[in-house]
Amino acid sequence: MSGVRRIGVLTGGGDAPGLNAVIRAVVKSCRLTHHIRVVGIMNGFSGLVEGQWKELEREDISGLLPRGGTILGTTNRGNPFRYVYRRPDGQEEVIDASRMVVKNIEKLGLDALIVIGGDGSLSIAERFFRELSIPVVGVPKTIDNDISATEVTFGFATALESATSALDRLHTTAESHHRVMLLEVMGREAGWIALHAGIAGGAHMILIPEIPFAYDPLLAKIRARERLGRPFSLVVVAEGAAERGGEQVYADEDAVTGWKRLGGVSYSIARRVAELSGYEVRVTVLGHIQRGGSPVPVDRILATRFGVEAVRLAVEGKFGYTVALRCNDIVAVPLAEAIGHLKRVDPACQLVQTARAVGIVFGDEDPEDVEAAEG
Ligand code: F6P
């Protein structure tokens, strides 16, 4: 019989649709299958620094499956090894609060800690496991789908649904007004949301960080469509996209942690396209719409599978691992292998080739080829 009696669960980093479904699955499988009690840690690792947690009872998880967000709260600023501490005088400073986390885990009597997070939170979990022997199990999450250990993360499909639906709406208004419409989507250093949404939503151009773009092929595509009697175009822009030889655009930077938030690149692209093409160009930055709302069924199912398997790993004492989806099975991958190298779009991959085959331009083509392809 397993010696695990009490498990802690926390959600860290940016939220993603499906977090609540994982929490629900953890609590249900702990209680129904393994007779283990669950403590919900509030606001990521910060809860273990500040002493914020609650026992999760049956009523806490009722109605959770379709709910977006996380009932436990989360933060991007909760790294205990570089904790942003607000002094009584209101000034912020960075301290190492990792020992407070260890103390609180002991105080709570946790036999395991399930960390649901992206690359940042899983890296923190791995460090607690490696340096301080904390019995952690990871669950990967992010709408960006950039965690290399797993083929898919929950949240991605829901974000994709929102981005595709936005493109469908932009399509009709672009056509009516004969405009070029830019839709900026999230994804950080990876173009997965942009690539998938662009294909699903019938975009004419997709700009992703992995393929630096030039303006000439974009112009060629706009002109070629015009000649075919289609004087409007849809462009999906990943927030991390950059012109060849240019820089990524940041919305802001956290003064204490130095974390830089991507966003806003579409505005300069729109200005340039308008200048060069003479078209009216409009920008929609989809933003956190992609993170909110109810998870779509595939995200609910993946989240449930991850939650149940994370508990199983904890019960088996398989710590220092994260659950991951591979070939439609949930497997255990060492955290050390799962972190630090993001999964990005390979410009030569089949999906990019598929997009090119249906005429989608990425901005790295020869403009003459783009013109010729449209006939
Ligand atoms: O990693 C998820 C993500 O939504 C990115 O796509 C985006 O760049 C970032 O988080 C936004 O972070 P914040 O919630 O701090 O605005």
Image (spheres, rainbow, N blue to C red):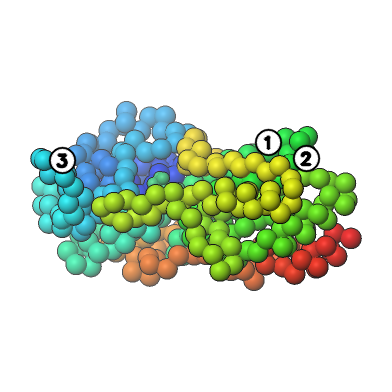
Residue 313 spot, x, y in % from top left: 33, 58
Residue 4 spot, x, y in % from top left: 22, 52
Q: Secondary structure at mark 3?
A: loop
Q: Secondary structure at mark 2?
A: loop
Residue 257 spot, x, y in % from top left: 28, 55
Residue hosting label 2: 178
Left/right placement of residue 219 relative to residue 243 reads right
Does label 1 or label 3 sit earlier along the sequence?
3
Residue hosting label 1: 169
Q: Is residue 24 visible?
A: no
Measure how far apart labels 1 and 2 are at the Cα level.
14 Å
Residue hosting label 3: 90
- Mark 1 or mark 3: which is in front? 3
Left/right placement of residue 311 relative to residue 145 reads left
Circle 2: residue type: His
Q: Are the residues flagged by discs 1 and 3 in contact, CB closer than 8 Å?
A: no
Q: Residue shown at 89%/60% (left/top)?
A: 375
Does label 2 or label 3 sit earlier along the sequence?
3
Measure how far apart labels 2 and 3 are at the Cα level.
52 Å
Circle 1: residue type: Arg
Please give the label number shown on residue 366: none
Q: Residue shown at 54%/64% (left/top)?
A: 246
Measure how far apart labels 1 and 3 are at the Cα level.
45 Å
Q: Residue shown at 51%/38% (left/top)?
A: 289
- Report the front residue among 31 and 84: 84
